Image: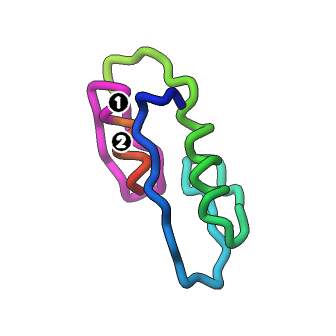
Amino acid sequence: LASSSPSLPPAHFDNDEPFFCQWLGCGQSTGLDIEALHAHVEAHLTPLPELDEYVCVWGPACDFHASTPSEFVRHVLFH
């Protein structure tokens, strides 16, 4: 992502379960590496097409909608 885009804060987890991408149709595991998951999710967001509305596809329970790419990226990065 461009330097003006929001980025994920450093995360520290006591986790012995692997991380999986919840992006619709993905499911890729990054093992225990949360930073690799962050990078993987950012790849889903680059580049974003120009749309009238952005709909979150992170897992089945999220129904977030955004009108701007920056609002959408900020939302996804906080999943």
Local SS, label 1: helix
Mark 1 crowd level (few <14, some 14–19, many ≥20, 10 Å Cα): some
Q: Which mark is residue 12?
A: none
Please tell me how many numbered marks the rendered image carries.
2
Q: Which corner quadrant holds the N terminus?
A: top right
Question: For the point 56% across and 41% down, which residue is it?
Answer: 42
Q: Position of residue 15 (x, y in %)?
A: 58, 82
Q: For the stretch drawn in magenta, what is the main secondary structure?
A: loop
Q: From which residue to which does the magenta span run? A: 54-71
At 42% from the left edge and 46% from the top edge, which residue is drawn?
A: 76
Q: Amino acid at mark 1?
A: Ser
On screen, residue 68 versus residue 47, left or right, reads left
Residue 66 shown left or right of residue 10 in the figure? left
Q: Residue furthest top?
A: 50
Which quadrant would the C terminus be assigned to in this image? bottom left
Q: Quadrant of residue 78?
A: bottom left
In the rendered view, tell whether residue 51 sits above or below residue 44. above
Residue under circle 2? Answer: 74
For mark 1, what is the residue? 70
Q: Tell me which residue sits at (67%, 56%) in the image.
A: 36
Pick whichever, 67 or 73, lies toward us.
73
Q: CA separation, marks 1 and 2?
A: 6 Å
- The image quadrant of residue 60 is bottom left
Residue 25: within the magenta?
Answer: no
Identify the image quadrant of residue 44.
top right
Q: Is the Cβ of the residue at disc 1 closer than 8 Å to that at disc 2? A: yes
Magenta segment: does it hold 63? yes
Q: Position of residue 14 (x, y in %)?
A: 55, 84
Instruction: Specify the amino acid type for callout 2.
Output: Arg
At a point 55% along the width and 49% down the height, the residue shown is 23
Q: Label 2: few (<14), some or many (≥20) within 10 Å?
A: some
